[in-house]
Image (cartoon, grey):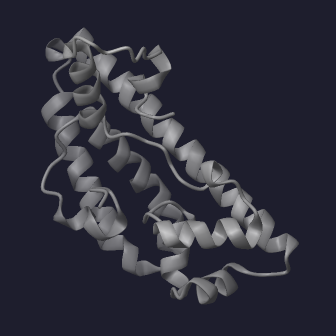
Amino acid sequence: MDKFSIQNIEKINSLTSELEYEKASSLYLNLRVLVKEDKSYEPIRRHLRGLIKDYEQNNWADEDKITDNQIKESDLAEAIVQAENLFYQKRKELIKTKLQATGLKQNDLAKILGHRKGYMSELINGLRPFSKEDLVIINRLFKIKLEDLIPTFIQQERATHIKKTLESLSNNKIKLTKKDFDLQMS
């Protein structure tokens, strides 16, 4: 399960990388809208604010200690989170367009999938991952391509492992492009 899924946020004690910082910052902003509709998100948002503040204090407060590598890592993390957010926004728009075209509402989709209203909102907004079965059902109901529903992100640690392993294999004929793993997405 994704560390930054809504149900896992309060279990996080600290942010340990620029990618985690960017994900936390993005989620913090996304929750701003949801808090207006549902106050139960406020403790999660406060927790995120504390994590973000601590990370900034520990890693960015002293300008003399900021390295070129740290800036490079920050830029990459920002690009990854931006690409993820674009994917989730496109998926959300596709689903909402199909719902509208079929005369259904988000609540109707929640009932079809067997979810409560708030949970469905978290799924649609990318705050929780859809189950594979949910995405297959959405694909079949609305004829949305699976590649537009299923995120193809590869976690940074996993992408690094794959690149290093491929480089170490002597009979390897797989050739990766820069795009294949740099943003940990396809």
Q: Position of residue 28 (x, y in %)?
A: 39, 55
| x 38%, y 80%: residue | 40
Above or below: residue 171 compared with residue 40: above
Q: In the picture shown, does residue 91 fall above or below 185?
A: below
Please state if 75 lies on the left or on the right of 186 as rendered: left
Image quadrant containing the N terminus: bottom left
Q: Nearer the viewer, residue 13 or 87?
A: 87
Q: Position of residue 123 (x, y in %)?
A: 51, 68
Camera-side residue of 137 and 59: 137
Residue 22, placed above or below residue 1: above
Identify the residue at horizontal 40%, vertical 25% (top origin): 181
Task: Indicate the quadrant where residue 124 lies.
Answer: bottom right
Q: Which residue is rendered at x = 42% and y = 79% of the image?
A: 39
Q: Residue furthest front?
A: 171
In this image, 171 relative to 54: left or right?
Answer: right
As rendered, which of 72 and 169 lies closer to the eye?
A: 169
Image quadrant where residue 55 sits: top left
Which residue is pictured at 21% across the width and 51% down the height?
51
